[in-house]
Image (cartoon, helix red, strand yellow):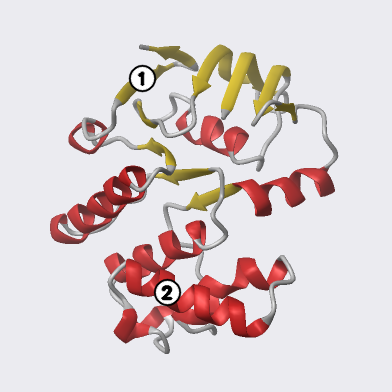
Amino acid sequence: MLKLIHASKIYHESGVCALRAIDLTVERGDYVSITGASGSGKSTLMHVLGLLDTLTDGSYLLEGEDVSRLPPQALARLRSQRIGFVFQRFQLIPGMTALENVALPLTLQGVPRAERIRRAADMLETVGLADRLEHKPGQLSGGQQQRVAIARAVVTHPGVVLADEPTAGLDPEAAADVLALLDRLHQAGNTVVLITHDRAAAARAARRLTLNNGELLG
């Protein structure tokens, strides 16, 4: 599903080497967690896997295709088709309802309106928000906003779900709900990669890895 080969990322303007010759393979159906201290390279790794950033050296294979040197437009197309990204700060559009936020990726893919509304509503029901379809982000709790974000990430049936610190800033009950939802997504056959500073959250994954100063440890 995902394969990094001697993957390195250097930010030349600052001289920081965020990733150091990383080798990583994530198979279809895996649930992988990656922990590490602040500044260890977790966010950079997630952005590379999510096609939001590119490597300085090495290769990245997504479902067997080398995407390391693709132009930005091609990366954006692949990102919308194959990757569901759950951001730390939700990244919902304030002026849109929960239903509209979840349907947005389907809109960008050209899915007919009736189908995208049906699929978005079904996904919100799956995450326990069938009664919040018309609520805007500002009318939802943090945990509910993150569940909307997860629904948006998986409504396109992507090949992999990348969750970047999805419980950051949530109260314990809301965080537990979000992690239980990720568990259910994995049990349903989804490939999940979880970046987290929370070792208890990381322990829920089948494979647990650690980043230390840009190096990936088992």
What amino acid type is highlighted by mark number 2?
Asp
Can residue 115 be seen here? The reply is yes
Q: Which mark is residue 180?
A: none
Judge depth for marks 1 and 2 and give the one in front: 2
Q: Secondary structure at mark 2?
A: helix
| Residue contact at pointers 1 and 2, CB within 8 angstroms | no
From the viewer's side, name the closer residue of 199 and 11.
199
Residue at point 55%, 81% (across, down): 117
Residue at point 61%, 72% (across, down): 104
Q: Secondary structure at mark 1?
A: strand
User: Which quadrant of the rendered structure holds the C terminus?
Assistant: top left
Q: Which mark is residue 210?
A: 1
From the viewer's side, name the closer residue of 40 and 105.
105
Instruction: List x then y, in percent, for residue 23.
Output: 55, 12
From the viewer's side, name the closer residue of 176 and 17.
176
Q: In terms of image quadrants, where is residue 186?
A: top left
What amino acid type is highlighted by mark number 1?
Thr
Q: Determine whether, in the image, residue 3 is placed left or right of residue 137.
A: right
Q: Residues within 10 Å of mark 1 (few under 14, many from 20)?
A: many
Q: Which residue is mark 2?
A: 122
Of the image marks 1 and 2, the number of the one nearer the N terminus = 2
Label 1 and label 2: CA atoms lie apart by 35 Å
Instruction: List x then y, in percent, for residue 212.
Output: 40, 16
Can residue 15 be seen here? The reply is no
